Image: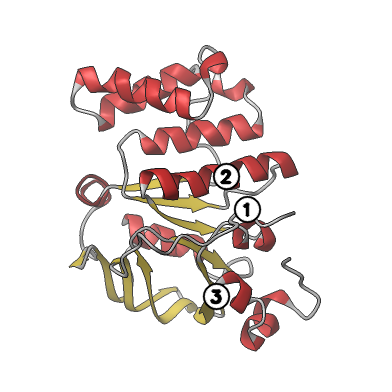
Amino acid sequence: MAIIKKFRIKSYKNLNPIIEFENVSLSYGRRQILENINFQINEGQIFGMLGPNGVGKSTIFNLITGLINPDSGKIKINGENVTEYPIYFRTKKFKVGYVPQYGGFFNDLSLYDNLKAISEIVIENKNYRSERINYLISKFELDNLKEIKAKFLSGGQKKKLVIALSLLSDPRVLLLDECFAALDVLTIKMLQEIIVNLQHENKITICICDHQARDLLACVDVAMILSNGKIIAQDTPSNLVKNISAKNAYFGDNFKFN
């Protein structure tokens, strides 16, 4: 597949960290999931996380959203230590949106009613709800699917719906968990274009974790490799695939990006 990002958007980006992990560690019983990790995601960046199963990628998302707390270390959003803040407060104050790998919608509600139900929770202004719903339906070209129950949508259509649901609250940060999993090639390309457009047009900071290395590297600015609870390497896609530590821990010798 050709690289979706024919250019890497740098000019408008500030090097202001919007998410920071400082010496974060987490264990489940005797199993060390994350060991003293440090990294930052800068404002306006598309940031990728790669690594084997069980290495802690989804755990990092859970730490950002507040679903779990670290054993030690700090998690900062916009420079503020949020380690002890509850989920709803992080979502509302810091505008963090989350797209789960599975689900994220009401199966027996229509696409439109899914958007309407969530809008009533996240948008206080009643008049703005309809405006926001119509904008997202138009943006993702979902007009002809409004009355279809979510359970009858295709995989790509469901993914569009879940992303639209996450955008109702106009987030500044969007977390995408395994977003390319179980999708066909054309749907993956569509999703990559959506991600890049969200960055370029809406100036949203995006963090993606996935096992589909080529698909992830095609649309991110920076990616990091996790292995054995630690960050092995972090760099631009073209540099990362040449990194010896990244090859040994994840890519192998035969991985080709371009």
Residue at position x 35%, y 28% in the image: 118
- Residue 4 got which mark? 1
Judged from the image, the secondary structure of the residue bearing numbered disc 2 is: helix
Please name the residue that numbered disc 3 is placed on: 226
Answer with left or right where residue 177 lies relative to residue 37: right
Relative image position of residue 197 (x, y in whole percent): 48, 44
Q: Residue at x 46, y 29 (%)?
A: 139
Marks 2 and 3: which is nearer the front? 2
- Pointer 1: residues within 10 angstroms few (<14), some, or many (20+)? some
In this view, 198 is above or below 251: above
Query: x, y percentage for residue 165?
Result: 41, 33
Q: Position of residue 108 (x, y in %)?
A: 52, 19
> Which of these two is toward me, 82 or 184?
184
| In the image: residue 39, left or right of residue 91 | right
Q: Residue type at mark 3?
A: Leu
Seen from the viewer's position, the closer of residues 97 and 227 is: 97
Q: Which residue is under mark 2? A: 193
Q: Identify the disc placed on residue 237.
A: none
- For numbered disc 3, what is the local secondary structure? strand
What is the three-letter code of the residue carrying label 2? Glu
Mark 1 touching mark 2, by CB under 8 A? yes
Which residue is drawn at the image coordinates 51% and 57% (left, top)? 208
- Residue contact between numbered discs 2 and 3, judged by CB atoms under 8 Å: no
